[in-house]
């Protein structure tokens, strides 16, 4: 793919606790916070975001790292540029105190900013609440954001933190015990959490989804795919369910997974709003 200029998105800023970041917005209706995977807001992430206005939602993409719109694949800029782009984003994140990459049982400080963004977008966009889709490096952020009652549809696409280097890290998520307890309470009261992974993904081991099942019970909806379901044209091994490894063809497993995510968001934000409005 070519780089994406984001010409159809409205560019703005949001400030919380003294930290200002760029935010890209598209559409109208209840807000869906799309938190990009490493190395940033890629063309494939933008493809996913552009589907949300078709549901009757506003796509909201905070710029946390990387170069928005840049295609990370080697075919776009060459292998060396692709590696440099990825490592540059990863290095900046790893040295930042806002992101926790290795610690189990700890919520990254950036999540506080994301919760504030979600609250602001709910006030701005209306509707019964907001959704959040975290991907890869940010997958667990959607779970940690769900301490807020306004978050009605958390989606964890290949949640990869903490990096699964030890048994404890494999059997955990990047969320504090207090935040997890609050999410468990919300799940007991009707919240559902949707998670997606490829079964062979070394960054999202089976133990991590077992951890989520243990703590969230039937409220955790797991979508697990085989290697043969991934787009064979992708550069890396099966990992990015909704973006780089998506085969966007009806009848394929990743296409079904994508539409399960879209329906999950639609039912909790748009249809819920329509039902409430009819009373």
Image (cartoon, rainbow, N blue to C red):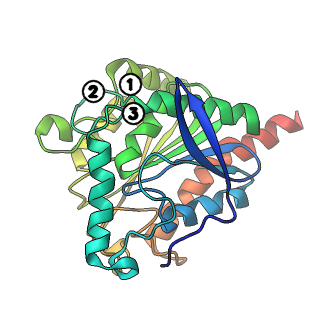
Image location of residue 255, percent across then percent down? 50, 69
Quarter occupied by the C terminus: top right
Image location of residue 172, percent across then percent down? 25, 35
> Quarter of the image holding residue 101?
top left
Q: Counting residues from the N terminus, which is met first, the one under dot 3 or under dot 2?
A: 2
How many numbered circles are shown? 3
x 71%, y 50%: residue: 57
- For mark 2, what is the residue? 105
Q: Nearer the viewer, mark 3 or mark 2?
A: 2
Label 1, residues with CA under 10 Å away: few <14, some 14-19, many ≥20: many
State whether residue 202 is above or below residue 114: below
On residue 217, the disc is 3
Question: Element type at marker 3?
Answer: helix
Image location of residue 138, percent across then percent down? 40, 45
The answer, for residue 245, to whether it is visible in the render is yes
Q: CA distance from mark 2 to mark 1?
A: 9 Å
The answer, for residue 151, to whether it is visible in the render is no
Residue in the foreground of this view, choosing between 256 and 66: 66
Q: CA distance from mark 3 to mark 2?
A: 18 Å
Whether pointer 3 and pointer 2 mark residues with C-beta atoms closer than 8 Å, the reply is: no
Residue in the foreground of this view, choosing between 215 and 71: 71
Q: Counting residues from the N terminus, which is met first, the one under dot 1 or under dot 3?
A: 1
x 34%, y 29%: residue: 175
Residue in the foreground of this view, choosing between 77 and 257: 77
- For mark 1, what is the residue? 180
Whether pointer 2 and pointer 1 mark residues with C-beta atoms closer than 8 Å, the reply is: yes
């Amino acid at each position: 793919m070519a780089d994406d200029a984001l010409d159809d998105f409205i560019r703005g800023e949001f400030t919380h606790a003294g930290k200002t970041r760029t935010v890209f917005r598209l559409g109208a209706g209840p807000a869906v916070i799309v938190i990009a995977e490493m190395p940033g807001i890629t063309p494939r992430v933008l493809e996913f975001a552009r589907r949300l206005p078709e549901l009757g939602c506003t796509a909201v993409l905070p710029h946390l790292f990387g170069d928005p719109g840049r295609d990370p694949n080697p075919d776009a800029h060459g292998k060396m540029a692709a590696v440099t782009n990825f490592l540059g984003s990863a290095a900046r994140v790893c040295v930042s105190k806002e992101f926790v990459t290795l610690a189990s049982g700890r919520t990254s400080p950036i999540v506080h900013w994301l919760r504030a963004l979600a609250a602001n977008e709910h006030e701005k966009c209306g509707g019964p609440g907001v959704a959040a889709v975290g991907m890869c490096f940010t997958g667990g952020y959607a779970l940690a954001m769900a301490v807020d009652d306004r978050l009605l549809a958390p989606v964890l696409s290949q949640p990869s933190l903490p990096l699964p280097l030890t048994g404890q890290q494999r059997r955990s998520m990047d969320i504090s015990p207090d935040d997890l307890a609050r999410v468990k309470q919300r799940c007991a009261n009707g919240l559902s959490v949707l998670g997606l992974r490829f079964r062979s993904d070394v960054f999202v081991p089976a133990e991590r989804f077992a951890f989520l099942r243990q703590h969230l019970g039937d409220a955790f909806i797991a979508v697990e795919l085989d290697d043969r379901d991934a787009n064979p044209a992708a550069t890396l091994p099966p990992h990015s369910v909704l973006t780089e490894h998506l085969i966007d063809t009806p009848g394929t497993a990743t296409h079904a997974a994508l539409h399960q995510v879209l329906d999950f968001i639609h039912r909790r934000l748009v249809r819920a709003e329509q039902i409430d409005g009819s009373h």
